[in-house]
Image (cartoon, rainbow, N blue to C red):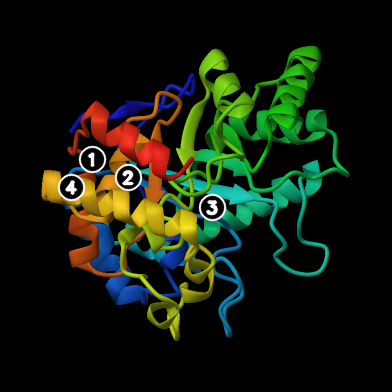
């Protein structure tokens, strides 16, 4: 499998990044271990998580996903240096536990390292913008952690083009490492926030781009065709928001390409992302081996120019 260079980080990632937000939510520990085993057995090596995953689940406290990944790593199913672990800091973990101030980052990284049962994180991201903290302070904290060997590379999530450029300017002025990776929301339906200035800046500055919500909460898998399909599902509420004229046009285009290629809609939606010049790799989740098989097939699916154009127009 051809790995993809992640901007200027010195890291390379598998063409599909596994979304660990499901661990401790829609996948219990045993299921999560089985999925991780199968993902690595298939030749993939990159897992995305965050300290806050999955605090939204009743009974969870946050850190649940990191803990499951840590237990899996501890079993020695894969050598630590064969796995690329991405996690994030900044989302609210409790009273006074959020944001990107130096002291909080230095505390939060220790908690993540404990949960992950490792002594370093391959890629550490600021999860959300923090208007109360200067970029220099956040980047300074990340620089300390890099010097200490606790993190290998840094990035951000959910910044727009103006914010990302401001972070570059702050890094250059202060002589600090810049963000070399961004995680934007980007998929066949949700395109406006990434396409245009942000995508252009990422290409110009050689920024690694790992997309989240790559399957639009499962909508692009084609399993939600009506409001009834979304009822009682963990992600049904989010998927229901896509059931409009634009969403139905995208599903129709996916169905057309599926007939031509024999691939499933989810595989095609991920292959469309992989065909984009600015995108390094999409994040996608699975809660069963059958779903995982579909995700891994997308890495080798090459869409024709006509298919990409058809999908582009449907989601425009």
- Classify residue 294 by image quadrant: bottom left
Mark 3 is surrounded, within 10 Å at the Cα level, by few (under 14), some (14 to 19) or many (20 or more) other residues, namely some
Residue 4, horizontal then vertical, whole percent: 33, 28
- Mark 4, mark 3: which one is toward the viewer? 4
The label shown at residue 113 is: 3
- Classify residue 154 by image quadrant: top right
Residue at 36% x, 59% y is: 285
Indicate whether 191 appears above or below 92: above
The CA distance from mark 1 to mark 2 is 8 Å
Residue holding disc 2: 270
* Callouts 4 and 1 close, C-beta under 8 Å: yes
**Which of 257 and 99 lies nearest the eye of the viewer?**
257
Per the image, label 4 sits on a secondary structure element best described as helix
**Looking at the image, can residue 149 be seen?**
no
Which quarter shows the N terminus? Answer: top left
Residue 197, horizontal then vertical, whole percent: 63, 25
* Callouts 2 and 3 close, C-beta under 8 Å: no
Residue holding disc 1: 299
Residue 17, horizontal then vertical, whole percent: 36, 45
Residue at 55% x, 55% y is: 50
The CA distance from mark 4 to mark 1 is 5 Å
Residue holding disc 4: 297
Per the image, label 1 sits on a secondary structure element best described as loop
Per the image, label 3 sits on a secondary structure element best described as helix
The CA distance from mark 2 to mark 3 is 30 Å
Q: Earlier in the sequence, mark 3 or mark 1?
A: 3
**Which of 209 and 151 lies nearest the eye of the viewer?**
209
Residue 31, horizontal then vertical, whole percent: 28, 73
The CA distance from mark 3 to mark 1 is 30 Å
- Classify residue 80 by image quadrant: top left
Residue at 72% x, 22% y is: 165
């Amino acid at each position: 499998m051809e790995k993809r260079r992640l901007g200027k980080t010195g890291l390379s990632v598998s063409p599909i990044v596994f979304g660990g937000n499901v661990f401790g939510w829609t996948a219990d520990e045993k299921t999560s271990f089985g999925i991780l085993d199968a993902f690595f057995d298939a030749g993939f090596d990159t897992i995305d998580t965050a300290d806050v995953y999955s605090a939204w689940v009743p009974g969870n406290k946050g850190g649940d996903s990191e803990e499951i990944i840590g237990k899996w790593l501890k079993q020695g199913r894969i050598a630590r240096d064969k796995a690329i672990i991405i996690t994030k800091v900044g989302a609210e973990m409790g009273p006074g536990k959020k944001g990107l101030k130096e002291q909080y980052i230095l505390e939060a990284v220790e908690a993540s390292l404990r949960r992950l049962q490792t002594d370093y994180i391959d890629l550490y991201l600021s999860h959300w913008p923090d208007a109360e903290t200067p970029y220099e302070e956040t980047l300074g904290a990340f620089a300390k952690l890099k010097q200490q060997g606790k993190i290998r590379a840094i990035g951000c999530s959910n910044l727009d083009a103006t914010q990302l450029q401001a972070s570059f300017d702050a890094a250059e002025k202060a002589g600090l490492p810049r963000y070399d990776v961004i995680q934007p929301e980007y998929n066949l339906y949700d395109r406006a926030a990434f396409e245009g200035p942000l995508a252009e800046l990422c290409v110009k500055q050689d920024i690694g781009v790992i997309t989240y919500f790559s399957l639009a909460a499962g909508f692009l898998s084609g399993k939600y065709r009506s409001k009834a399909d979304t009822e009682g599902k963990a992600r049904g509420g989010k998927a229901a928001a896509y059931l409009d004229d634009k969403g139905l046009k995208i599903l129709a285009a996916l169905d057309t390409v599926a007939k031509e290629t024999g691939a499933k809609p989810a595989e095609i939606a991920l292959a469309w992302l992989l065909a984009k010049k600015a995108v390094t790799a999409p994040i996608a989740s699975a809660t069963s081996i059958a779903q995982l098989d579909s995700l891994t097939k997308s890495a080798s699916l090459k869409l024709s120019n006509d298919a990409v154009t058809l999908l582009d127009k449907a989601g425009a």
